Image: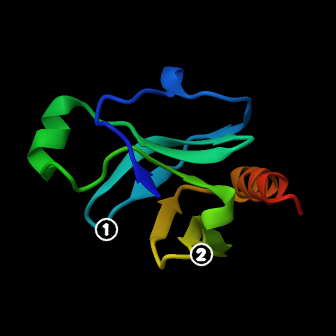
Amino acid sequence: MEILDQDFSPSQIEGTIIGDFSPAINVSRLASFNGKLIFTTEKVYVMPNYNAGMYDAIGAGLYEPRCFTYAEVGSYKKTGLAGYQITLKDGTVLNFSNVFGKMRKGITAALEEGLGQ
């Protein structure tokens, strides 16, 4: 997984976007942020949405924008009532919440399209 610069924005994403969802990105039970999960034909981007003040308050390095390729995906599944989890082959676990039926189906379809399934 590649950690992107803190000021990386969706406008800098290259490639064709095949999916764009807005779940909450969970760092822990106490720290979650609205964000974007953006799928291109090559990579998946996880883009937390918080202002500089929030970033300073939670501590630099807790959760920067990041991206990974489909080849790095180990598994993905629904968790709880409205959760979704993507686990990478290196053991990194990405948790999302407020992912209800329609969004969950869309995320699954985008992952499967990227994985060629």
| Residue at image location 25% in from the left, 64% down from the top | 30
Quick check: 92 above or below 46?
A: below
Residue 116 coordinates in the image, percent (x, y): 87, 58
Disc 1 residue crowd, few under 14, some 14–19, many 20+, Cα 10 Å: few
Please state if 103 lies on the left or on the right of 105 as rendered. Answer: left
Q: For this rendering, which residue is in front, 29 or 20?
A: 20
Which residue was labeled with disc 1?
28
Q: Quadrant of residue 104?
A: bottom right
Kind of element beneath mark 2: strand
Say which amino acid is labelled 2: Thr
Image quarter where the C terminus lies is bottom right
Quick check: 9 above or below 35?
A: above
Residue 39 coordinates in the image, percent (x, y): 67, 43
**Are the two marked residues, 1 and 2, in contact with CB atoms closer than 8 angstroms?**
no
Say which amino acid is labelled 1: Ser
Q: For this rendering, which residue is in front, 94 or 22?
A: 94
Disc 2 residue crowd, few under 14, some 14–19, many 20+, Cα 10 Å: few
Q: How many circles with numbers are drawn on the protein?
A: 2
| Residue at image location 63% in from the left, 46% down from the top | 43
Which residue was labeled with disc 2?
79
Residue 82 coordinates in the image, percent (x, y): 59, 64
Quick one: label 1 or label 2, which is nearer the N terminus? Answer: 1
Residue furthest toward the top? 11
